[in-house]
Amino acid sequence: MSRRRIALLTGGGDAPGLNAVIRAVVKSAVGRGWEVLGIRDGFEGLLSRSGLMPLVADDVRGILQTGGTILGSSNRGDPFRFPEEKDGKVVRVDRSAEVVAKIKTLSLDALIVIGGDGSLSIAQRLGEMGVPVVGIPKTIDNDVVGTDLTFGFNTACQTAMAAIDRLHTTAASHHRVMVIEVMGRDAGWIALKAGASGGGDVILIPEIPYSIQAICQKFAEREARGARFSLVVVSEGAHPEGAGKVVAQTADKSRTGYERLGGVGHALAREIEDSYDTECRVTVLGHVQRGGTPTTMDRMLGTRFGVGAVNMVEAGEFQRMVALRCEQITSAPLADVTGALKLVDPDGEEVRALESIGVSFGRPRRGSEADV
């Protein structure tokens, strides 16, 4: 078996299970006699003299159960649009040629990129420039096309569900509407799964624009049956119907390249209090959903993804992403899975099932839905 040299990096936001992936890649590759390099702080590490660290089995001992990533991460290091300050302003410059040159200088047989749609899109473009790249899908949002599941999602849902469980008793005790804002950006998977599992009465997701009137109608129906409180789980990217826009903490994209979402929970609470005679309280879970000990599912999926990526390198399957399909590890071309998001189907089975037991998605009730 020929000795190979591979490198791996973690890009974008952190997610529970990242260290499980790193551990699996290192142990699987070292077990084949390969050399592994870790790249610090995402793609930025390929543009820095101190951005590399050799990894052996001892370096990944005891990290399976820890959150975060021992390599560090960054969502500001896109080499095709690298941020630099000039004359007091942040400008974007293309430094991709430097990255390709660095990879050639290191004599890498493969670059493994662990990340979401943004990082995988960068990997796909580097692949077009001749870099032998393998992608591993990572995001708590579960919005990567081509895979049934991404690691980190299950832990984020468990964290959100536990918070909703705890807020349930406070809402009931004080006869209030509790609004719980969760992450997800343009995809409503966390709100859908955690909201359903936590007994949310109203679940608002980006894929279904909401009507404040429909939400208040749900409150009125619950009050009529003697329920003097309600739980509203809202995804950070949810927005009202019509010309309604998402709520962003800042629209400045100069550093990260995207709007920083957040605040819809407080905006929604004000709308509810203005439209309905009730008292609201807001809990924003924020980055607590990203951290902490990964669940069994995320540790196992991360391990399988890591080993799958090393298998792909050995087989020469480059410019592809490891994926989970029907409980089996497989792969998909990066070109087919980047540039689009896997979103909740507004009329899919899960949404319809929840509506049939009385959960409101902030839209008018349809004829087949139960009033419970």
Image: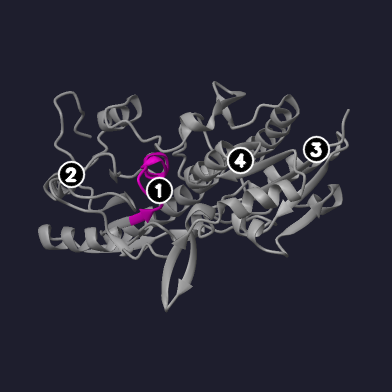
The x and y percentages for residue 199 are: 36, 43
Indicate which label's residue lies in the foreground, 3 or 2. Answer: 3
C-alpha distance separating marks 1 and 4: 17 Å
Q: Amino acid at mark 2?
A: Lys
Measured in 3D between alpha carbons, the distance from the residue under mark 3 to the one under mark 4, in whole angstroms, is: 21 Å
Lower position in the chain sequence, tag 1 or tag 4: 1
Q: Is 372 left, or right, of 335 in this rendering? A: left
Q: Nearer the viewer, residue 286 or 330?
A: 330
Callout 2–callout 4 Cβ contact below 8 Å: no
Q: Is residue 137 left or right of residue 352?
A: right
- Kindly identify the residue that appears in the image at 51 percent across and 43 percent down: 153
Check disc 2 and report the residue beneath it.
Answer: 218
Q: Indicate left or right for 84 with 113 as reference.
A: left
Q: Which residue is mark 3?
A: 29
Instruction: Mark yes or no: residue 293 visible.
Output: no
Q: Nearer the viewer, mark 1 or mark 2?
A: 1
Mark 3 or 4, nearer chain start: 3
Question: Which residue is identified by label 1?
Answer: 184
Location of the N terminus by quadrant is top right
- The segment highlighted magenta reads 180-195
